[in-house]
Image: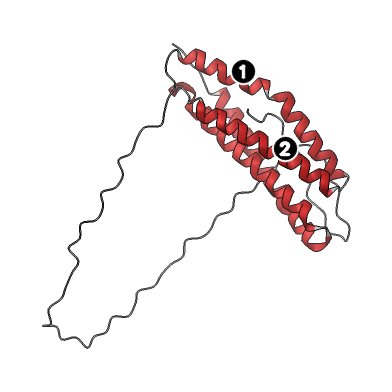
Amino acid sequence: MVVVVLLAASRPRPGPATPPVGSGGLVPAATTTAPSTIGPTAVPSAVPSTAPTSRSTATPPAPPVPTDPPRATGDPRLAYAEFLLRVNDDRATVEALNRDLATAAEAQDPVAVRVAAVAILDFVDGERDWLREHPPAECYAAAHGAANAMLEAYGLAADRFVTWAATGGGLDGLVALGEALDAAQDASDALTVFGRALEATTCQA
């Protein structure tokens, strides 16, 4: 379920040739969009100040009532043990996925890159489903959330490599590779956050 080893990739150096990708930490960069600002609209001043005004009397809808996130029932130690078991069981799978992607990227084989990246996306979908179907006990809710965030970053990284594989090289390929490597670094950072969350977790009955 949870990514323990990420594909590491070095940034491309300036130059005409696409640099090789090393092995190490995997993928996606989150993009943020700055909120747009709308200036005040002009209001005509020709209406006399004594003219009647009309205002809407409609009652705005009530905001949704916040609900607490689902939590596991029963002994929290058992729920946390199941969570950790899932993490450990996924080590070999993640190592194989990362190795396949690193090998394909180093060979600059777009078909193999896409196959490896799509396999990662499928893995991420399955693990996020597992997390959703296994809500945490309160004692490890932070680690559970960090795992979900890490999986999202891992999937975004894989998606960037799919984009790179589709560029066909050239300048567009270099740009896409740079974005894929940035995403890989973000996923590596998310892995670090997850590891710290695990270290800080203690579940007791």
Task: Please identify the quarter of the rendering in which residue 18 is found.
Answer: bottom right
User: Is residue 9 visible in the rendered structure shown here?
Assistant: no
Q: For the residue marked with disc 1, what is the amino acid?
A: Leu
Q: Quadrant of the N terminus?
A: top right
Tag 2's secondary structure? helix
Q: For the residue marked with disc 2, what is the amino acid?
A: Ala
x, y (%) of residue 110?
82, 49
Q: Crowdedness of circle 1 by 10 Å Cα count: few (<14), some, many (20+)?
A: few
Q: Quadrant of the C terminus?
A: top left
User: Is residue 77 visible in the rendered structure shown here?
Assistant: yes
x, y (%) of residue 65?
30, 40
Q: Crowdedness of circle 2 by 10 Å Cα count: few (<14), some, many (20+)?
A: some
Q: Residue at x 75, y 37 (%)?
A: 7
**Above or below, comparing residue 4 to residue 186 in the picture:** above
Horizontal side, residue 193 vs residue 66: left or right? right
Horizontal side, residue 50 vs residue 158: left or right? left
Q: Residue at x 51, y 27 (%)?
A: 133
Seen from the viewer's position, the closer of residues 21 and 108 is 108
Q: Residue at x 67, y 39 (%)?
A: 121
Q: Nearer the viewer, mark 2 or mark 1?
A: 2
Count of picture labels: 2
Tag 1's secondary structure? helix
Horizontal side, residue 108 vs residue 120: left or right? right
**Above or below, comparing residue 13 to residue 145 in the picture:** below
Q: Residue at x 29, y 47 (%)?
A: 63
The residue labelled by disc 2 is: 119
What's the CA distance linking mark 2 and mark 1?
22 Å
x, y (%) of residue 150?
60, 36
* Residue 85, label in figure: 1
